[in-house]
Amino acid sequence: MKVLKFGGTSVGSIENIKNVKDIINDGHKKIVVLSAMSGTTNKLVAIANNISNKEPNEAVDKINKLHEIYTITIDTLLTNKDLNKEVKDYVSSVFNFLVTCTYKAFSIDLENNIVAQGELLSTYMFNRFLQQESISSALLPALSFMKIDKDKEPDISYIKKHFEVAINAAGNSEIYITQGFICLDDKDEVSNLQRGGSDYTATIIGAAIKAKEVQIWTDIDGMHNNDPRYVENTKPISNLSFDEAAELAYFGAKILHPQTVTPVRADNIPVRLKNTMNPEAHGTLISNITSEKGIKAIAAKDNIIAIKIKSARMLQAHGFLKKVFEIFETYKTSIDMITTSEVAVSLTIDDDRNLEKIIEELEKIATIEIDTNQSIICLVGHSVVNHQDTYKLFQILQDVKIRMISYGGSKNNISLLVDTKDKIDSLQKLNDYLFELVTL
Ligand code: ASP
Ligand code: MG
């Protein structure tokens, strides 16, 4: 069986919802994972923020506006009177629940329950829409099988077992629809797989049922070779290896949740990225096949903090790096890039929640310098470090101040750290010289 995930824009307008129906209605049994309609999760987060800031009137205002949008969508999508009424009743119950949340004291559990409603709404509506169109479908409640453990990792054996229970309970059906993003935590409270987490839901289910393929349907023809938000003339990449895709997703290619390929790579389940608005386009196939050499794609990740740790004690001494790493370990902060010299080590993090405490600890053993507003530019491709074009990077970026370089950590990745203000210029230059064959 295949698992097909459709993102927020794919279920965000009547036209796209109808496209999704046509894509999935091909006579094959499948699992369909849906995101919330585009914009909904952002609004739900904003409502939770209003509650946290003790602004209940603003929250209620947003809830009412969102409710109106859903009412209009239902009236256009569900022309069958009975289904229209049934879905409106369900949607009203969700919005009434949101209003009751505005009377409550803020907590993370409350916020998680609020943001979970987006996927519950989209899947309920879509299931009933398929029924109206005489397509056999059933809902699998994600909260009955999707679970993370205390380290926020998917609990695969639990998921396998309970997914089977859910699918058996749903009975025979052509299309099984479930919610992306939402899950239970180790205490059985409603939680989620972080923003963009529906991709991750799809590959977790894919791994649990040993799917033939996982498809991620979005609003672009696959993963592009550079960031289309900042760079002109980007192009879709037709094939990526799991390693290449993982590096790109982690280092900023916004199209995929960073963990997407993790669950499926061991079982070699291919992940295909497709465009709901242009289903004929090839998209990107992520698999264990490594194709042509050289730099295939560039991505950038913002909000990076560089920490320079300098100590005379590091000179010809062992054990210094261990002490440094232990501090980051204590505060559960992962390090992205690292470079060292004999007397200093520079590293980057993107999680600043414990930055002050980390600095306090580091200052006991070294002198610390912090640079904020940094961006990691990540160049990915099979064996990029050995490729003949790689030397050109220094020429291409000769006018950009490069703060750190990571080369050789993996054969498939070269990472550069630049000031965020130089990011767009760097991305465009790399694109022109590496992919558009502008000569130096
Ligand atoms: N709706 C969630 C979000 O906007 C999850 C997803 O779309 O993947 O982050
Ligand atoms: Mg997404």
Image: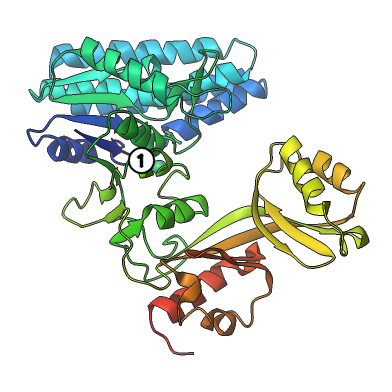
- Colour setup of the view: rainbow
Locate the N terminus by quadrant.
top left
The reply to whether residue 227 is in sight is yes
Amino acid type of the residue tagged 1 in the rendering: Val
Q: In this view, does 255 lie above or below 387?
A: above
Determine whether, in the image, residue 235 is placed left or right of residue 386. Answer: left
Q: What percent of the width, then of the height, locates residue 122?
A: 31, 26
Q: What percent of the width, then of the height, locates residue 53?
A: 67, 24
Q: In this view, does 353 lie above or below 118?
A: below
| CB at disc 1 and ligand 2 closer than 8 Å | no
Q: What percent of the width, then of the height, locates residue 251?
A: 52, 54
Mark 1, other Cα within 10 Å: few <14 / some 14–19 / many ≥20: many
Q: Mark 1 points at which residue?
A: 264
User: What count of labels does the image hold?
Assistant: 1
Rendered residue at 75%/36% (across/down):
330
Q: What percent of the width, then of the height, locates residue 270?
A: 28, 47
Dividing the image into four quarters, tell me where ligand 1 lies.
top left
The residue nearer to you, when weighing 346 against 34, is: 346
Determine whether, in the image, residue 5 is placed left or right of residue 184. Answer: left
Rendered residue at 78%/48% (across/down):
322
Q: Is mark 1 on a helix, strand or loop?
A: helix
Rendered residue at 82%/63% (across/down):
344
The reply to whether residue 55 is in sight is no
